[in-house]
Image: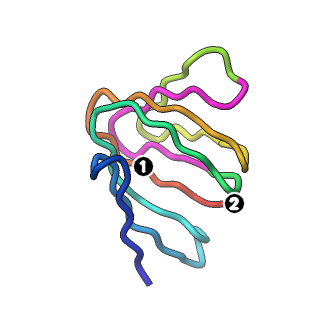
């Protein structure tokens, strides 16, 4: 079953799904802006198109991830994103 999600007044939208090859995941798009997300469980984020500038928990410097790049976010944490252009992603819940 597909689940539609919307955050930050519609600037981030995703569709949640579960599959045998991916597990529980969501795919979505972020509009330009700055966002802070909290996690309940560990996440694996893959940038599909565009770019995400990311400040991970306990990091002191921002890192930019482009198409095909993957980063991991610990569970029960918070991470910050800066998005300069519409960017698509795949988020796997680990």
Q: Observer-nearest residue: 66 or 12?
A: 12
Decide whether the magenta segment is chiefly helix, strand or loop: strand
Where residue 59 sits: x, y (%)?
68, 22
Residue beneath the point at 69% across and 42% down: 77
Provide the residue designation for mark 1: 89
Whether residues under marks 2 and 1 lie with C-beta atoms below 8 angstroms apart, the answer is no
Residue beneath the point at 44% across and 84% down: 1
Quadrant for residue 74, please give it.
Answer: top right
Residue at the far bottom: name it.
1
Judge the density around disc 1: few (<14), some (14-19), many (≥20) Cα neighbours within 10 Å: many
Q: Quadrant of the C terminus?
A: bottom right
Residue beneath the point at 30% across and 27% down: 84
What span is colored magenta in the figure? Answer: 44-58
Query: Where 15 sits versus 8, above or below?
Result: below
In the drawing, does residue 28 fall left or right of residue 21?
left
Provide the residue designation for mark 2: 94
Quadrant for residue 15, please give it.
Answer: bottom left
In the drawing, does residue 5 fall left or right of residue 71?
left
């Amino acid at each position: 079953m597909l689940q539609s999600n919307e955050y930050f007044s519609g600037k981030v939208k995703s569709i949640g799904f579960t599959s045998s090859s991916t597990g529980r995941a969501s795919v979505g798009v972020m509009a330009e802006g700055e966002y802070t997300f909290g996690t309940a469980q560990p996440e694996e984020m893959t940038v599909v198109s565009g770019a995400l500038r990311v400040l991970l928990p306990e990091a002191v410097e921002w890192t930019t991830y482009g198409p095909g790049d993957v980063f991991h976010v610990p569970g029960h944490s918070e991470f910050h994103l800066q998005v300069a252009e519409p960017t698509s992603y795949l988020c796997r819940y680990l």
